[in-house]
Image: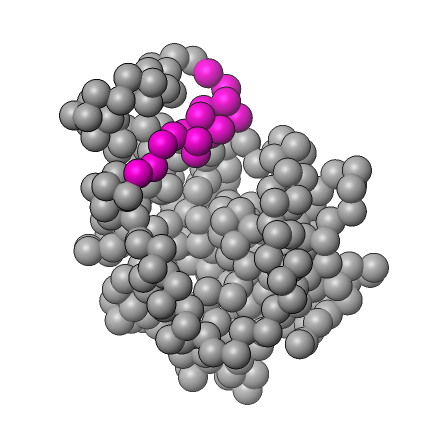
Amino acid sequence: MPYINIGEIQLYYEEYGIDNKKTMVYFHGGPGESCLTYTHQAKLFGEKFHIISFDQYGVLRSDAIPDNTPFGVYDHVNLIEKMRIALNVKSWTPIGHSYGGMLACLYAYMYPDSVDGVIYDCPMWSAKSTAKTIAETQLPYYEAHDFKNEIGVCKEILFNNISSKNAFEKATNLKLTNELRKYCHVIDNAEYEQYIRNNIPDINVPQNYWYKFLHFQKMLFANGDFYNNYMVYLSQIKKPSLLMVGEYDMTCGKEQQDWFCEHSENGLFFILKNSAHMSWMQVPKKYSSLIVEFMENI
């Protein structure tokens, strides 16, 4: 496995299309998902661009975050910049999926000279806004099925002045039945696992690595900056930006979409029909064509 050392931290990374001129770097979501599910897509993009994809610090094949070591969003962004320097990449285009979109936004804001452009794939720039989108999307289902507790939680998120942390925790703990998953167009677990089997053969990861994400999430959420509103930085990012959102995505809802369209100085926005949060699995051709066109024009 390829690793790079950033000080005392060891990060797992994958690299494709090394001889190509333009570089993309993939920031995975989750939080804590790893870059594993993007390996197939990274290989395809590697035919045209230089691609770097990595497990974030504390996730899967990268080093675990030690106990009692504060490590939040800003810390991850600073570590990513150190990784760019260590890899001897002059500049690159981050592509951030979900929580990775939060990292991509903050990274482009903090290190504008290190980016050529930035791609947001169903990003989460505001935990509270995402919580509201989840509640708004799922509330009609709960009302139709008389799920009283869930109705109350959704209305509390939508209509009460609760904290970002409280709203996000409540939203992500809502009951998600199989029927509700279909109602919300959430990708089926069996379909997800089949994609992995078909496109990422020979997964050789020790069993105990799979549970690192639990500690990663604990440390990230405890830090507190995960719950900041990062939408405010979009207006200060001057490099070309591409926002792609699945038609049924519950992470980047209308509030965040509208904010991008109004405040992104050099931004393009596309809705990906017939997909939800994992468009590269659900509509791979359209997903890839948008990214290729964007990269070829920056």
Q: What is the residue that sits farthest to the left in this orientation?
A: 144
Q: Is residue 296 visible?
A: no
Of 246 and 244, nearer the camera is 246
Residue 74 point in image, percent of width and height: 65, 43
> 192 above or below 88?
above
Residue at figure coordinates x 83%, y 59% from the top left? 8
Of 235 and 290, nearer the camera is 290
Image quarter where the N terminus lies is: bottom right
Q: What is the residue that sits farthest to the top in this orientation?
A: 160
Residue at figure coordinates x 27%, y 32% from the top left? 138
Q: Is residue 135 visible?
A: yes
Q: For the image shown, how many numbered marks are present on the structure?
A: 0
- Please give the range of residues in magenta: 162-177
Check residue 167 for magenta coloring: yes
Of 133 and 228, nearer the camera is 133
Q: What is the residue that sits farthest to the right in this orientation?
A: 8
Residue at figure coordinates x 34%, y 51% from the top left? 277
Residue at figure coordinates x 23%, y 46% from the top left? 182
Q: What is the residue that sits farthest to the bottom in this orientation?
A: 19
Specify how the rendered protein is coloured. Answer: one colour
Residue 258 point in image, percent of width and height: 30, 37
